[in-house]
Amino acid sequence: ISLIIMPLSITILLLIFAIIFYRIKPKVSFIALIMATSLLTLSTLPPVSDAIMAPLEDNYAVFTRSKQPVDYIVILGGGHTTIDELPATGQLNSSSLSRLVEAVRIYRLHPEAQIITSGFSGGDISSNAEKVKQAAVLLGLPAHKIITENFPQDTEEEAQLIAPRVLKRNVVLVTSAYHMPRAMAYFEKYGVNAIAAPASPWVKNNHLTPWQYYLPSAKKLQQTSMAWHEILGRIVQWIKS
């Protein structure tokens, strides 16, 4: 359902609608065309995209160092594509890779911690948890300190399955910055008071605003889609609660 109601999908549906009704109801067709053009333009404008994404990412500060020893570093699942010719790091998608890099940074600060990777296969031949572990080993983390949770299919399942292992422990939770509020809420629901470690925010404050910032960008369309997907996820979370 979320794929169908993404900005680009809605734009395409409106354009198809405009073509179908071009001769039957020209006025309706014109309205659909204007709506499609407006939605696509707004979704690709950096100021608009940043305004939608920033509130999702500004809830937690960057992790520095815990005052107490860290027992677990939990890396939530992202995505990957198994291609044997590539190293494991090259098989991860951008969200998984950025979360792993943040976890590696935290592990350098707290080498006493164990690492938990999470995520199911999503149709691939290996789970995301296992692929992230392989990539982590390539980046120098010891394999014997990495635990994989290979079956959670979404954030709520990750919290539900990981919580029993980490209850009453000092836990650092690593996920994308925009996804952190929803992830923290799920882990709190199952009794885990984790320390947030947001990874790779989309919106990076820059006091310099060149004229390019106000032009449409395909990257910002992706950012808007990610923000919209996360907003839908939070709506579903609220309904479930």
Image (spheres, grey):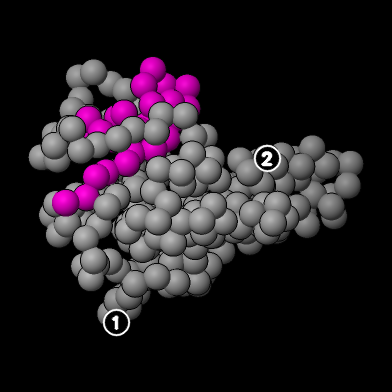
Which residue is located at x 45 percent, y 72 percent? 59
**Residue tagged by mark 1?**
207
Q: In this picture, is 15 found above or below 212?
A: above
Q: CA distance from mark 1 to mark 2?
A: 38 Å
Residue 177 found in image quarter: bottom left
Q: Hey, what amino acid is under mark 2?
A: Ile
Quadrant (top left, top right, bottom left, bottom right) of the N terminus: top right
Which residue is located at x 25 percent, y 57 percent? 70
Give the percent coordinates (x, y) of residue 176: 39, 55
Q: Which residues are magenta?
A: 112-135
Numbered badge on residue 1: 2
Q: Secondary structure at mark 1?
A: loop
Q: Hey, what amino acid is under mark 1?
A: His
Which residue is located at x 35 percent, y 55 percent? 169
Marks 1/2 in contact by CB < 8 Å: the verdict is no
Q: Secondary structure at mark 2?
A: loop
In the foreground, 117 or 16 = 117
Based on the picture, tell me whether residue 229 belongs to the magenta stretch: no
